[in-house]
Amino acid sequence: MQKQWIRLSTIQDIRIFIETVTMSDVLVDLRSQRYLVNGKSIMGIYSLDLQSPIEMIIHSDDCPELMEKLSRFFTDEVGE
């Protein structure tokens, strides 16, 4: 399992993020405060507080290509 803080600031960011994780067989969850949603669910993502960094949880240790594609969303900020 890998964890990384990300920021999805625009509708375009959300669209690209979902397209990227949907092409992967890896399970991706997103956590914001006490909410945990499927990272492939547009409705789930829109239910999160997108003003704050979001914790991305990838349920695999062997997905360097996916991590590279998603690196554009990485942030050093830490949410709640």
Image: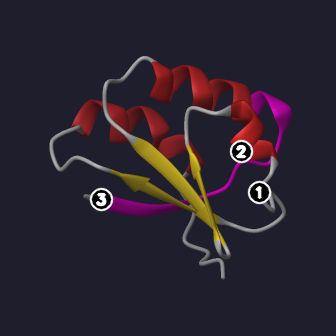
Image mark for residue 45: 2
Q: Earlier in the sequence, mark 1 or mark 3?
A: 3
In the image, the segment drawn in magenta is 2-13
Is 78 rendered above or below residue 1? below
Image mark for residue 62: none
Is 8 rendered above or below residue 23? below
The way the protein has been coloured in the rendering is: secondary structure
- Confirm whether the magenta stretch covers residue 4: yes
Dot 1 corresponds to which residue? 48
Dot 3 corresponds to which residue? 2
Judge by depth and name the residue closer to the eye, 71 or 62.
62
Distance between the alpha carbons at the discs numbered 1 and 2: 5 Å
Judge by depth and name the residue closer to the eye, 9 or 61.
61
> Could you classify mark 1 by the number of other residues whose Cα lies within 10 Å: few (under 14), some (14-19), or many (20 or more)?
some
- Residue at 71%, 43% in the rendered image: 44
Tell me the SS state at disc 1: loop
Q: Quadrant of residue 1?
A: bottom left
Q: Are marks 1 and 2 in contact (CB under 8 Å)?
A: yes
Relative image position of residue 15 (x, y in whole percent): 71, 25
